[in-house]
Amino acid sequence: MKISEVKKNYPWVFERGKNCILSPDSDGLLCGLLMSHYLGWKIKGFYDGKLLILEKGLSAKDCVFLDIDIFRKDIKSIGHHMVLLNKAKTPSNWSNYDQCIQPNIMRNYDMKTNFKLKYPLGTIHLLLSIIGSDLKISIPDKAVPTLLYTDGTFKNLFNYPENCLDWFQYLGISDKDNVLNKMFYIDKHALRILMLNLKKVFTDIGLIGKGKRGGDKLYISDTSGIPKNLDKTKDLYNIKQAEKEKVKKFINLLSASTDWEYKDEDWTWENFSLYKFTKGGDSPTQSNYDIVLAQNPLSFVIRSATASGFEYALESPDKLP
């Protein structure tokens, strides 16, 4: 990945004070924490693939989606999922991704021929490799387990070592000047020590979730897309106090491990407008893929070759603001 090309094609990722919308999981929250700390970005909403909550009066065009691949030419986003089915049959509206920083698209990887080579890390690692070229970012030793935990990165390192090493080369992590070099290329993070530190991460998250999984996420809808953990006052929504406190505990846990300051004034927790979308799932066949892409989906991802491995969101009943 040539940072000079990223700067040329996506100069906005280096700009200060931008508004952003996060995926509500550990990767998205880490990205928000990073960009708030170093570039003063403001977190204005959350999108989970079924619904979007966005600060009243804002347009999606005013924001950057972090840890989400948005299929809109006029929307800026950063994601890392597999989205192309067959590079020999690239959809006619593929230019919708022109403002999406996406490693699989950068390498022209598709499911048909490159699925085993897809990007194996989190959006936070991609983002660190990009903005770390300009900013003096340091990763303390205590942050390593957290950055290995997010998006199941630690599992991919051991399950797909050849692929991970290839991506290390592509992202420039093998370069000693890369902010992630310290994390992946030094000897002091012995396997047993990493296991113990990862155990602590899981324990801490379990305590936040009161013994249940989910302490590392903000839940704004259930599996059917029905709003969850939101209070409505007239036409506006606020994140419920208990859920907000839980998520803030997790963000502060991330902050303590990375030394990226949580600035409460940069994070929006109330006065949201809510937008519902139709989430679908199907097997990733060429015919299914063509039908969905012809409907101009807001976002989509190919997770596997299974019956519901192709997930997507359509702008219905609401439109993106």
Image (cartoon, helix red, strand yellow):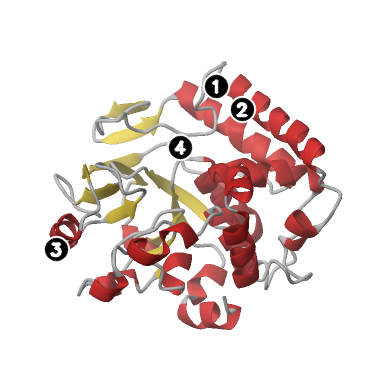
Q: Is residue 281 left or right of residue 216?
A: left
Q: Counting other residues with Cα less than 10 Å from the Cα at mark 3, is it few (<14), some (14-19), or many (20 or more)?
A: few
- The amino acid sitting under disc 3 is Ala
Q: Position of residue 27 (x, y in %)?
A: 53, 46
Q: Is residue 91 left or right of residue 269?
A: left
Q: Which mark is residue 294?
A: 3
The answer to whether the residue labelled 1 contacts the one labelled 2, judged by CB atoms less than 8 Å apart, is yes
- Secondary structure type for disc 2: helix
Mark 1 and mark 3: Cα distance apart in space? 40 Å
The answer to whether the residue labelled 1 contacts the one labelled 4, judged by CB atoms less than 8 Å apart, is no
Q: Position of residue 221 (x, y in %)?
A: 32, 32
Mark 3 and mark 4: Cα distance apart in space? 35 Å
Q: Earlier in the sequence, mark 1 or mark 3?
A: 1
Residue depicted at x 50% and y 83%: 8
**Residue designated by label 2:** 205
Mark 1 and mark 4: Cα distance apart in space? 19 Å
Task: Report if residue 118 is visible in the image.
Answer: no
How many discs mark residues in the rendered view?
A: 4
- Secondary structure type for disc 3: helix
- The amino acid sitting under disc 4 is Trp
Query: Which dot, 3 or 2, sits closer to the camera?
Result: 3
**Residue designated by label 4:** 269
Query: Which dot, 1 or 4, sits closer to the camera?
Result: 1
Task: Report if residue 199 is visible in the image.
Answer: yes
Looking at the rendering, which quadrant does residue 249 occupy?
Answer: top right
Q: Is residue 204 above or below residue 106?
A: above
Q: Which mark is residue 209?
A: 1
Q: Nearer the viewer, residue 142 or 82?
A: 82
Q: Position of residue 200 (x, y in %)?
A: 72, 29
Q: Counting other residues with Cα less than 10 Å from the Cα at mark 4, is it few (<14), some (14-19), or many (20 or more)?
A: many
